[in-house]
Each structure stands twice: as C-alpha cells, then as structure tokens.
Image: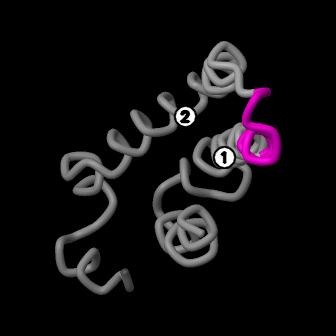
Amino acid sequence: MHHTIEERHIFPILAKRMPTFKDDEVHIKSHHGIHEGLDKLGALLAKWNAQPSTYSPQEMKDCLDSWREVLFVHLDQEVEDLSGENMKKYWTLQELERIPM
C-alpha cells in the first residue's frame, strides 16, 4: 500500500521537477525488487504457518539476505532524495506544503 500511494500520488508530483521520481527510475525499480522479496517472505511465512515443523532460521536468513541490498539502497536513496537540502533545489517550502500528503 505504501509504495502504491507513493507511485500513484506522490511520485508524479515530484517527477515534474525531480528526475529520480520519473516512471521506471530508481525508486520505482527498487519498489519492484522489494516486493519480490516480500512475496518470497510471505510464501515462506505461509508455509511455516501451515507446517511449523518446517521452519528454518537459515531459510529465513537467506530470504531476507536475498533482498537486503535493494531494500537498504532504496532507503538510503529516499533519505538522500527527500532531504531538505535536496528538496530545496527543486521546490520552495510553500510548494512542498501544497503537495497532498
């Protein structure tokens, strides 16, 4: 839900002035990678809920590690792109206050 709101409502506004928020750019691509990881994790959780004896800490770790990089790079990139210093390059404070959140 979080990424859907960003992609449908926030990114189109930001993309008018900020290239990293355009379709298929950095943030949207990373959302897809994160969702692939979450889907894998969801499948494992469903399996373990159905058959608790099959739980494997190593399998959990391997799953989380498989999408660790895309998640952490994405979080770091969003922090940088949405920092006050970066936003000042593209928007005035009054303009930012008018973006619906």
Q: Position of residue 77 (x, y in %)?
A: 44, 37
Q: Secondary structure at mark 2?
A: helix
Residue at label 1? 25
Between the residue at mark 1 and the residue at mark 2, the CA separation in whole angstroms equals: 15 Å
Q: What residue do we see at 39% from left, 33% from top? A: 76
Circles 1, 2 touching at the beta carbon (< 8 Å): no
Stretch in magenta: 43-54
Q: Residue 71's mark?
A: 2
The kind of residue tagged 2 is Leu
From the viewer's perspective, is 79 left or right of 61? left
The chief SS type of the magenta part is helix
Q: Position of residue 3 (x, y in %)?
A: 58, 62
From the viewer's perspective, is 13 left or right of 97? right
Q: What residue do we see at 47% from left, 66% from top? A: 14
The kind of residue tagged 1 is Glu
Q: Residues within 10 Å of mark 2 (few under 14, many from 20)?
A: some
Give the image quarter of residue 70.
top right
Q: Residue 2's mark?
A: none
Q: What residue do we see at 54% from left, 34% from top? A: 71
Q: What residue do we see at 73% from left, 50% from top? A: 24
Point out the image quarter for the C terminus. bottom left
Q: Secondary structure at mark 1?
A: loop
Comparing 49 with 17, the one in front is: 49
Q: Position of residue 86 (x, y in %)?
A: 28, 47
* On screen, residue 42 above or below 18: above
Q: How did the renderer colour the structure?
A: one colour
